[in-house]
Structures are given as structure tokens and as C-alpha cells.
Image (spheres, coloured by chain):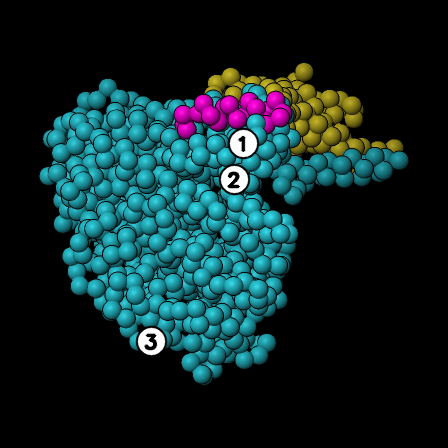
Chain colours: A cyan, B yellow
Amino acid sequence: MRWVRAIVSLVLAAAIFWGLDNRHGTFPALGKLLNPFAGFWQNGSRSDAVPEKLAVPGLRDEVRVVWDARRVPHIFAQNDHDLYLAQGYVAASLRLWQMEFGCLYTAGRVSEVVGPAGLRQDIFTRRFGLPWAAENAVRAFRDDPEMGEVVDAFTAGVNAYIRTLGRKGLPVEYKILDYRPEPWTDYKCALLLKAMAYSLASYNQDAALTQMMKMMKDQGGWPGWEDFGDRLFPFMPPLVDPVIPPGTPLDFTPLPIPSRGGAEGDGRNKGGASGPAAFSRSLDHSSSDAGGFESPGYRTGPGLGSNNWAVSGKLTRNGFPILCNDMHLELSLPAVWYEIQLSAPGVNVHGVAFPAAPLVVAGYNEDVAWGFTNGTDDVLDWYDITFKDDSRAEYLYGGEWRKATVREEKIKVRGGATVVDKVVYTHYGPVVRLKDEPPFSNMNVPPGAALRWLAHDASNELSTLYALNRARNYADYVEALKTWDCPAQNIVFADREGTIAIWHDGKFPLRWKGQGRYVLDGSDPADEWRGWVPRGHVPHVKDPDRGFVSSANQMPTDAGYPYYLGWDYAPYERGARINEILRSARDIAPADMVRMQADVLDIRARAVLPGLLDLIKEKPATEAGKKSFEELRAWNFEARAALIAPTIFREFWNELNRRTWEDEKPRGVERMTRPASQVMVDQILNHPESEFFDDADTDGAVEILADIAEQAFLTAVASLEKRLGPFGETWRWGKVKGTQLRHIARIPGFGREKVEADGAGQVIDAIDAVWAPSWRMVVELGPEVKAWGNYPGGQSGHPGSKFYDDFVNDWAAGKPYELVFLRSADEPNPAVVARTVMRGEK
Amino acid sequence: MTAVLMCLLAMLGLQLLTPYWWWVMIVPFAYGAAAARSGWKALGTGFFTAGLLWLGSSLFLYLTGSGLIAARMARMFGLGRSWLMIVATALVAAVAAGISGYAGYAVRAFFKKPAK
């Protein structure tokens, strides 16, 4: 009996020990996590205390870090090496877990931490060639001695911080997921850059559009089908006010523009796919069965966008330029950005940075300010590959068989066997999805096609940031932009000499018009990219007569620009609204710009809604219908959280779009790719009897806008009632929109849900559900530069810190903070709350 | 009483010096195997001392800056109130320590008694 008792109790104790010491699925190791001496209890706000002195190995001289009341570090170093080493140390102390997790994600190593649940994501990341792209980027900045030193110093700083961490000091997410940080490397900085490229320069509808056109062709019965794509997805969309003011003269002689046949056209967008026959032929190469292109609910709208503008001193109260920028990214906690000032001999810059890379990304110094919006040009193409046989060892190119290579991707899986994925590479790039494979949820990938993506090429974007951080004038800025390849950006600029400018900057393939809109033929050398648009030829403008420059991810140029850069730009609303306000602005003060960043006027609603309501002849019978109608009639077109009208309008708009476009799709296409909003607005305003409004499912009857508008309104109200209950409180826009900041690893309780904020995706203050302004900045240049800014989050990445999400409420309310810009470490400033002196070895 | 105090001090010291949580199982096991006069005594001492240690220390931390992280953890675990994290912390330690203490005693009993 005694031995039974001994064995049973021992086994029980051992089981408890094992159970508490290990993770089970996603359930954490409770013993380690709850341990008050080293577990999560140690991750409270006591760690917010700032040390007065720190020994940071590797520093050559003394570095002083001044902390302001919002926990913004102002780093004063005596040389570049120390500056970036200190930045690495400080960034890691604020955001280490976020930095590392982002790298694991981009390196395709999520499975190492979360187990088999991460495998599909990792396979996609590796197939897409993100680790490969980062390896190429590392080579580029190792070849550049200046950047090599910056990145090495940053890396040393991160590692110096990691070495100070015992288990007790680890960020809480490590404790929950039960793993430890590994040493930082320059490769990880490169991964961050590639993550940005993926997020900003990989969106494409190539597969969906190819499938649609191919099916129209194959199914017959679509008279004029060849033009269908160009009508619904026009190269020059209606209503758009381009980034570069129309009529801006070219200050360069364009290169000859290639055409598909190989001959070269002569500029002005005339070269190109030329004619339906050529286009029809181009679809035939696609050996894959069109049914193999799946298009489930992939990300449809370009959810991401940003605004920036600069006004010249002619329009401002103090006579110097004002520059504004708000970059829209996916909301998250910890936030995408952190704020920092970096000062050393030759540089004193303030702005926001990515935690995982050195330098300030968007910001200002005493002389200049700059900011970004995404360019969204087409730098990603799919090439249909004809393999010789199932071994995929050779593929057809220019009438000959070329050898493919294989890159073995070894994916370690926590609690499972390592998975080896053999990725086939052509000279274009990797084959992301093989013909017989199921679709990825990340992207609509054409099966059997190779990916040609600019971000795979070696590039050195950090050197642009390095130079911008130190820029003194327009010439410095233009020089800095030359190494910015991908993702292409509208980089706005202003300096205290009074110059304003915007360059739509990036490396652009020289293409025939429309090249790459559909899946290309990988066997035909004629379908290859034909060189590059020269750097001086990218769209740009300096000091335009109108006194301002602006961008909101819209079409960069009008038809006068010679090169084809892409077609899938952001809809017109934000850009048009910005220009509308600035055109009549005079005597501008920074406060006006802050107000403008919070502008919520929906110009799309203003353009179409009164007319649409006039079409609703028969007054709605239901109570909700009547109230909704009145609500829309009385609406001032502002997307305010407290209003109900924005909710009804969005539903009405979606329903109208569904009725207009969904019946145009060929059989077998799951969901019709929606044209951009300006195409719909154009149809409503200028073509109310367009055949697109005809409901293809009704025999004989021909519907026009007036017929479907009324139905769409009634259906919209009915579906809102069904989803939200009776007309009332629950219909308010702020509630329905459901803005939230999710934790990066989606840990419940670590994000912020139900943030009530004005704004919508199509207005300047683009706070939507998960996409929103990630950094709002207003910089007033002058004898003494002044700036305001805010971002959704807080400086600390530690969920137990009071600085974790302390900016969120002010951000949601559109209130920026006056930024603290110090000239020296000793400068007295009431906002300074603490100082840290860093030295090398004691 | 001496046993309780000894266990408590041993655990506290070892926990302060090292990051390992499992001292709350090792110490009671050792006490059970070396000194406890009965299984129930071993179990009770382990349960009480480890529970008290983790209750006291987590309560202290809760009141001095870890309230916010406790609230987030409570949300993660689906517990309604942040102070429930203190209860959970104390309970985990107490149960693990109690059973470990009992197992320690049972092992000693197995080796010791057959001589009789």
C-alpha cells in the first residue's frame, strides 16, 4: 500500500511539475508565468523607471539621453557610431519583443514560436521570397561602408540591451509564449525593410483580373469584352486630381517607351499593348485552366493610404512653409512607430522611427521636413511558367529550356518535425504556388506563375533616410532620394529657405502601357521588364504656382507624363478634398493644418447622395426606412462617430455597388473585382443610364440607376436593421465602424477595443476599423522649427507600462502634442523629466 | 511553526536569487522527505507556505505597479477581475507545493517503514 501511495503521489507531483513548466497548445506555462519573482508580475510599471547611469558596452564616448514627459528619448551622442548604438539600445528597451516578433514573421519563422498553427503563414512568406529579399538587402548595405557602420552600431546596441536581460526582465510576451530573444543581426534590419515593402508594394489584382478576362473570352457572349477591363479599371481614372499638378512641364527628355512587340514607341503613353487582338493573344499563353485562379475574399480595397502636403510661405501666416503628413497603416499595439530625436555632430533630427531599424523615417530637422505616402505603383508581376516536366527542373524561355534552381526552406516547427519546402526559382523569381496547390489566404496567387518583384532586388533605402536626416536644403533632398527603390513613395519636402516639393520616388520598371496588369507570359522575352525609368524622370514638382504640393496615394500624374507606372492607385476622395481645402487657404497657421488632418468631410457622399436620394421616389414604408431617409437628407456629409448617416451611406453605397457590378461577372468567377469608387461616382453622375446598372438577372426589363438606387436603399436599410437592430443608438458610425488596436500577436486583453473616433477610409482623417493614420505630423519651418504630432499607441511596447497606449485617446480625438525639439542635451525645457548618461565599459 | 518558517524563508531566498518557479515544489518536497511528521503535515505546510509566499508577493506587486498588467493577464485568461490573478497565482503555488510536499513524505515513508 505504501508503495502505491508513494508512486501515485510522485507521479501526480511530476505531472503537475511538467504541466506548469510547459506550454500546452496556446496555453502558457503557468508556473513560469505566474511566478511573482520572475513571471508576468515583474512586468508592471516599476520598470518604467529611467536609470540615471547606464553602462552600454561598445560606446566610444559618453551619450546623454534626455526623456520628455511622453517618454520620448532625445539622444545626444558625440559621433554617428554612438548615436545609432544608443538608438538600438533605447529602441530595444522600449520595443524588443515587437522588433523580434516582426522579424520572425517576415523571416517565415512564426512556427518556431507558435507551433504548427504558423506553418501555412511561414510557407507563404518563404515562397514569396521575403527572407531571400532580405539577404539581398543585407549585401547592399554591407557594401555601403557608411550604412554598414550605422546598421552594425544599431545591432550592437540592441544586443547590449538583450545581454542585460535575465528571465525576470524579459518583455511579458516572451513569458507568455515561453521563448527567449536571440541575438540581433543586420539581417533583421533588412527583414523590417522587406516587411514594409510587402505591406506597401505587393498589393495586386493581376490574378483576379486575368481570370475575369479569360473567362469572358472563353465563354463568349461578351461583345466588346476586350475593352471591359479598360473601362472598369481605367489607366486614367475619372475625377482624380493627380499628385503632380496637371500641366507641370517635364524637365527631362523621355526615353523611348517600349511596346509589346519589341519596337519602341515615342512617348506620351502611346506605346503599349495596342489593340484588342494583341491583348486577346496575351491571354492565350496562360496555360493554366482559368478555373484554377481562385479569388475568395482577399483584401479588396486598397485599405492603406496616407496623406501628405506642404504649403509654401506665400500661403502661411509666418511666411515659412508648413509640412504635414499622416501615414495610414494597420493599427496595432505596440504601435508601428516610436518617436525619437537623434543628435550628433552633423545631425539633429526628430520624428518617428521603426523600432527594428536605425534612423528617423519621417520627421524634421532645423532646416527641412519630409514625409511619406505610399506610391502604390506596379512593381510586382506574375509570369506564367511552362515547365518541361513535373520535376520543374527546366522551363521554357525564348524557345529554349532554362534551368530552374531550388532554394530549400527549412521551417522549424515547435513541437513537431522540421518542414522542408523546396521552392522553385526561375530567373524572374520564385514560383509561389504550384499548379496543384490550394490557394493561400494571404494573396490571390496565380498557380504555376513565377513572381517578379522589385523588392527582391538589392537596394539601399536606409541610405536615403540617412541623407534625409541630415538634409539642409532641396539639393540634399533630391540627392537622398536616388537610392530609394521600393516601396515607391510620394516624398513631400519643405525647407526653411521656402522651397516645397514632392517626388513620386522609387525604382520603376520601364514598361509598355498596361504591362503587368494581367499575368504575363514567362516564356516570352518580350514580356520582360525593359530597364528602368531614369531617376530624374520620376514624377516630381518643385514650388508649383498654386503654392502647395500634396498626395494621397492617388494617380501620380496626368496623361502628359510619358511613362507607365501602374494603374491601381487609391480612389480620388482624399486627394481631391486636400486640394479643395488648400486651393482656397490663405494665412495658414499650424492650428489650421491640425484641423485639416482631422477633416472628415466625405466628398463622395457630397457628390452622389443628394442625386441618389432624389431618385428614391416612393417614400420608404417602414419606420427605419423613413428615418434613414431623413437622416441622409439632413446629413452634412461628415463622417462623425456620433452620427448615423455615415453608417447608412456606407451600407447604401456597398449595396449599390453590389447591384451594379456583381452581375457583370462571367460564370465561375466567385466575386467580381470591384472598380474603384471614382468609376462608380462617374457612372452615377455622368452615365445614369449605363448598361452596368441593368440587372442581368431580369429578363427583358432594362434597369437604369433610378431603378436600382431605390432597391439598394431599401435593401441597405433592411440589412442594417437585421444586423444592428431597430434604428437608433446601435447604428451610430463610431460603434458600427468598430475601430480597434489589436495586439500584434492577437493576445486578448493586450489591445484596445472599441475606440470611438470620427473619420472613415475615404476622408482625410482616415480612421477606419483597423487602418488609420499611424503618425500625424505638422511641421512649421522658420527661424525656430516647431512641430506637432501624435500616433495611436504609446512609446513603450510593454503592456504593463503606463506609456503603452497613453496617446490613444488624444489621437482618436484628433489632438496632437507639441513635439519637444532640443538643441542640446543641457537645454532647459519644462517637458524634460529624466536624463540618462550612457558610457562604455565602466 | 519552525517548519513553516523554514520553508517560507528557504523558498523566498531561492526565489529571490534565481528565476526558477519550481522552488515552490522542491522545498516542500524536501521538507516532506526529510522532516514532516505526517503526510497531512507535509501537504498542509507546502500548501500554506507556497500559497502565502506567492499570495503575498503578487499582492505586493499588484499594489505597487503591476495592477495594469494583472488586469491584462486576467483578460487574457478570461477572468473577470484583475485581483483574481492574485488568487490564481496563490492557488497554483499552493496546490503544486502541497502535492509535492505530500509526495516527499510518501517517498520517505516508503523507504523508512519496511524495516519494522
Bounds of the magenta segment: A620-638
Q: Amino acid at mark 3?
A: Gly
For residue A595, the mark is: none
For residue A617, the mark is: 1
Relative side of A179 to B98, left or right: left
Q: Amino acid at mark 2?
A: Ala
Camera-nearest label, 3 or 2: 2
Residue at 58% x, 59% y is A666
Residue A163 lies, in percent from the top left, at: 40, 42
Would you say the residues marked 1 and 2 are in contact, meaning their CB atoms lie under 8 Å apart? Answer: yes
Residue linked to disc 3: A262
- Element class at badge 2: helix
Quarter where residue B71 is shown? top right
The image quadrant where one finds the N terminus of chain A is: top right
Q: Is residue A826 visible?
A: no
First in sequence, mark 1 or 3: give its number: 3
Residue linked to disc 2: A706
**Distance between the Cα atoms at labels 1 and 2?**
9 Å
Mark 2 belongs to chain? A
